[in-house]
Image: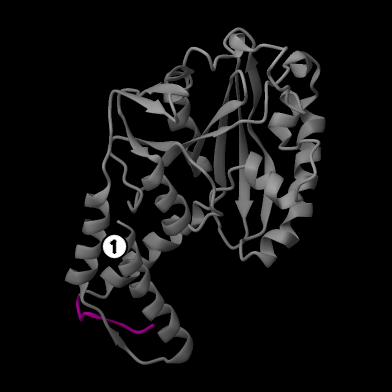
Amino acid sequence: MKNQLFSLFIIFSIFSVSAQESTDTLSFDLATYQKAMDSINNSFKYEHGDVTLGDDLAIIHIPNGYKFLNSEQTEYVLTELWNNPPSESLGMLLPENVSPLDDDFSYCIEISYSEDGYIDDEDAEDLDYDDLLEEMQKDVLEANPQRETMGYEKIELVGWAAPPYYDHENKKLHWAKELKFENYDVNTLNYEIRVLGRKGYLSLTAIGDVSVLDEFNQDKDYVIRSVEFNKGHRYEDFNPDIDQVAAYGIGGLIAGKILAKAGFFALLIKFWKFIAIGAIGLFSAFKKKIFRSSSNQEEDV
């Protein structure tokens, strides 16, 4: 799969360099292009039913209407295809009729795990989410210069697409952020779900443009219920005599801050999944541009 992705990126590179260095008309073999697209799409191996996450850490019951990509394939999609910062992932859920390279891509749900310790949830009832939002917006702005030096777009946290809600009984937290990426007209949705466990938490992040919020809300409850820690890793399995307690509570989990000596940008990458869904828009727009030239098989870049 990696070789297939690399071949496609070579195609993109040729067009990019030529656009900068020349105004010559370029010929493009549409059949070859489509064959490369189909090859990548056909390389994805999807799973259904019950899937174990990590080293017997948790289980996900793939909801009806969804399919699952394992961790290796998810990494390729997020970093190679969609140009996101590298991160460790346990896998990805996609609606059954969606592919990572679709023109009409709607959303996906990325799954990861952070072992930062047992999160004390005592502060959940006392949080002021408006104040928390203002703090988060400030943090995002302060991190932008470092994002730019690393080659990523600046981001603005527009606000809550859905305010935080904590299910105290099931130890599950969820909220949604609306993000604006520099140079993209359509805002991005990150719908965040956290499942608390004995030594850390599972993250499920629904990624798409903000217009898919209503669509995702229809399946949200099924997705939240689909994931659970296995015995020995559950929140109630916490042993205060031997287990570490996290340096933050529910508020810190939402805001993406911990009391640790680490780079500020690194913390934002760890806690926030800034998935540049706009990259998919550019990818699709480029493909449409190529296919609009099919009448003469040429595109004046």
Q: Residue at x 43, y 78 (%)?
A: 16
Q: Is residue 283 above or below residue 239?
A: below
Q: Position of residue 281 (x, y in %)?
A: 44, 57
Q: Is residue 9 magenta?
A: no
145 relative to 7 in the view: left or right: right
Q: Position of residue 68 (x, y in %)?
A: 34, 34
Q: Is residue 112 visible?
A: yes
Q: Quadrant of residue 170?
A: top right
Q: Is residue 149 above or below residue 46?
A: below
138 relative to 60 in the view: left or right: right
Toward the left, the furthest residue is 31
Q: Residue at x 64, y 42 (%)?
A: 270
Residue range corresponding to the magenta coloring: 295-301
Q: Is residue 294 above or below residue 281?
A: below
Q: Residue at x 24, y 64 (%)?
A: 36
**Residue beneath label 1, please?**
4
Disc 1 element: helix
Q: Position of residue 186 (x, y in %)?
A: 54, 52
Q: Quadrant of the N terminus?
A: bottom left
135 relative to 301 in the view: left or right: right
Q: Quadrant of residue 144?
A: bottom right
- Amino acid at pointer 1: Gln
What number of labels is visible? 1
Q: Residue at x 50, y 34 (%)?
A: 213
Toward the front, the furthest residue is 242
Q: Quadrant of the C terminus?
A: bottom left
Most common secondary structure along the magenta stretch: loop
Q: Is residue 27 above or below residue 178?
A: below
Q: Position of residue 114 (x, y in %)?
A: 60, 33
Residue in the foreground of this view, choosing between 13 and 231: 231
Crowd band around label 1 with a 10 angstrom C-alpha radius: few (<14), some (14–19), many (20+): few
